[in-house]
């Protein structure tokens, strides 16, 4: 992840190997980063109480500027889903394009992130594929 000091994050419950879920949307603030073996740990704070969690247990919270598409694009970008664009669909859903993203690290991570904010994947339109783990696609989401 990028430099997240001072960012508001949601803490995920569970662990990366058994599955993560968004327990609540309580906001924590990242106070410091500790270099770890394989991943970083964040010291997060809420109401004056600090705790240390793995970077895999934090998701940068979505801000609300009133521009839903821009807010979702920033949310996905801040959380390393690597979208190339996000647009509103005619039916009020969200279309997210990912260019040459890995099927697990970008495409499925995007699905997980969108689920945290109440969207589900309706369909995917592959736009480029060379047979590797990476491909380009537009993913169409609707509100749950």
Image (tube, rainbow, N blue to C red):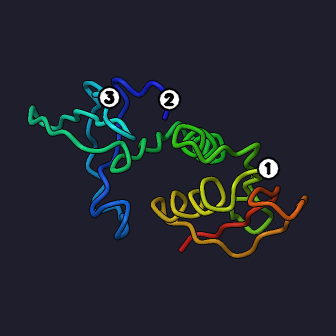
| Residue 24 x, y percent position in the rendering | 28, 59
Q: CA distance from mark 1 to mark 2?
A: 20 Å
Q: Mark 1: which secondary structure?
A: strand
Q: Is residue 117 left or right of residue 105?
A: left
Discs 3/2, front = 3
Q: Is residue 4 above or below residue 12?
A: above
Question: For the point 22% across and 33% down, which residue is it?
Answer: 43
Q: CA distance from mark 3 to mark 2?
A: 14 Å
Question: For the point 73% across and 51% down, which residue is it?
Answer: 101
Q: Bin the neighbour count of mark 2 within 10 Å (Cα to Cα): few under 14, some 14-19, many 20 and up.
A: few
| Residue 35 x, y percent position in the rendering | 32, 28
Q: Bin the neighbour count of mark 1 within 10 Å (Cα to Cα): few under 14, some 14-19, many 20 and up.
A: many
Q: Is residue 117 above or below residue 59?
A: below
Of callouts 3 and 2, which one flags the residue occurring earlier in the amino acid sequence? 2
The residue to which callout 1 is attached is 100
Q: Mark 3: which secondary structure?
A: loop
Name the disc covering residue 2, or none: 2
Of callouts 1 and 2, which one flags the residue occurring earlier in the amino acid sequence? 2
Question: For the point 76% across and 44% down, which residue is it?
Answer: 85
Question: For the point 41% across and 44% down, which residue is it?
Answer: 61
Of callouts 3 and 1, which one flags the residue occurring earlier in the amino acid sequence? 3
The residue to which callout 3 is attached is 35
- Labels 3 & 1 near each other (Cβ < 8 A): no
């Amino acid at each position: 992840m990028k430099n997240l000091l001072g960012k508001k994050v949601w803490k995920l419950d569970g662990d990366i190997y058994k599955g993560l879920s968004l327990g609540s949307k309580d906001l924590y603030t990242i106070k410091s980063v500790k270099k770890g073996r394989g991943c970083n740990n964040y010291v997060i704070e809420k109401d004056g109480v600090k705790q240390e969690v793995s970077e895999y247990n934090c998701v940068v919270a979505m801000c609300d500027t009133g521009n839903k598409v821009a807010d979702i694009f920033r949310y996905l970008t801040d959380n390393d889903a690597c979208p190339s664009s996000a647009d509103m669909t005619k039916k009020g859903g969200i279309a997210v394009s990912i260019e040459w993203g890995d099927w697990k690290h970008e495409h499925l991570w995007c699905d997980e992130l969108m689920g945290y904010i109440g969207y589900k994947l309706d369909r995917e339109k592959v736009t480029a594929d060379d047979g590797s783990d990476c491909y380009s696609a537009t993913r169409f989401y609707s509100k749950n």
